[in-house]
Amino acid sequence: MHEERCGRIVEVEAYIGADDRASHARVGRKGRAAIMYGPAGFAYVFQVYGMHFCFNVVTERDDFPGAVLVRAIEPADPTERGSGPALVCRALRITRVCDGMDLVTSNLLIADAPEVADTDVRVGPRVGVDYAGEWAGRPWRFWVANSQHVSRPRVTGTTLDPAMLG
DNA sequence: GCCTCGATTGACT
DNA sequence: GTCAATCGAGGCA
């Protein structure tokens, strides 16, 4: 029997395509992000700075690398912090053993949450990927306006353009 | 084999 | 504002 932990996702970033210089998929399908080249619905968990983990959800079709980094959650347990990708993993007890997990059938799940209005979604450039040149400027970070659990609350983004959602 | 650096955080000046 | 912690993946020889 395991202890159940959960939270509401309030901030994410997109990493799409092998050409994205900020994405680990750039090293190819044999690299550490090989899971990103597979079908959607699986976890990609990696370690950074030798001590922190980041949790991604593979999103795109099989054979095309794409994933969404969960940067912040609103933890169900108010004593936990979820305001940062490494803090999300700490709060949810996500480690490298979760890498490759099936998010539909395993005990690592993503469920529906109350819908957030488009007007409450903020958009801005991704964090911590300045090395990626022009790719760093892509407005592929999305967060819930006024959430107390966003990793960088002082950054103001633009409102979501519904047209870009397709 | 060796070297560099990272999708970060928290402590400190 | 600056900086250390800490280690594996990736780049290069």
Image (cartoon, coloured by chain):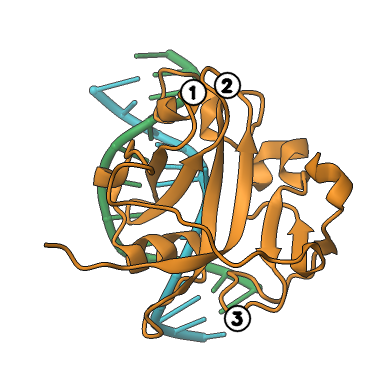
Chain colours: A orange, B cyan, C green
Q: Amino acid at mark 2?
A: Phe
The residue that mark 3 highlights is: A148
Q: Which of marks 1 and 2 precedes in the sequence?
A: 1
Q: Are marks 2 and 1 in contact (CB under 8 Å)?
A: yes
Q: Is residue A118 above or below residue A78?
A: above
The spot of residue A66 in percent (x, y) is 57, 32
The numbered dot on residue A123 is none
Q: What SS does tag 2 mark?
A: loop
The image quarter in which residue A32 lies? top left
The answer to whether residue A151 is seen in the rendering is yes
In this orientation, which residue lies closer to the viewer: A44 or A152? A44
Residue A7 x, y percent position in the rendering: 44, 69
Q: Is the same chain shared between marks 2 and 3? A: yes
For the N terminus of chain A, the quadrant is: bottom left
**Mark-to-mark CA distance, 1 and 3:** 34 Å
Q: Position of residue A95 (x, y in %)?
A: 29, 52
What residue sits right under mark 1 in the picture? A37
Q: Which mark is residue A64?
A: 2
In space, the residues marked 2 and 1 are separated at their CA atoms by 5 Å
Q: Is residue A51 left or right of residue A10?
A: left
Chain to which mark 1 belongs: A
Chain letter of mark 3 equals A
Disc 2 is attached to a residue of which chain?
A
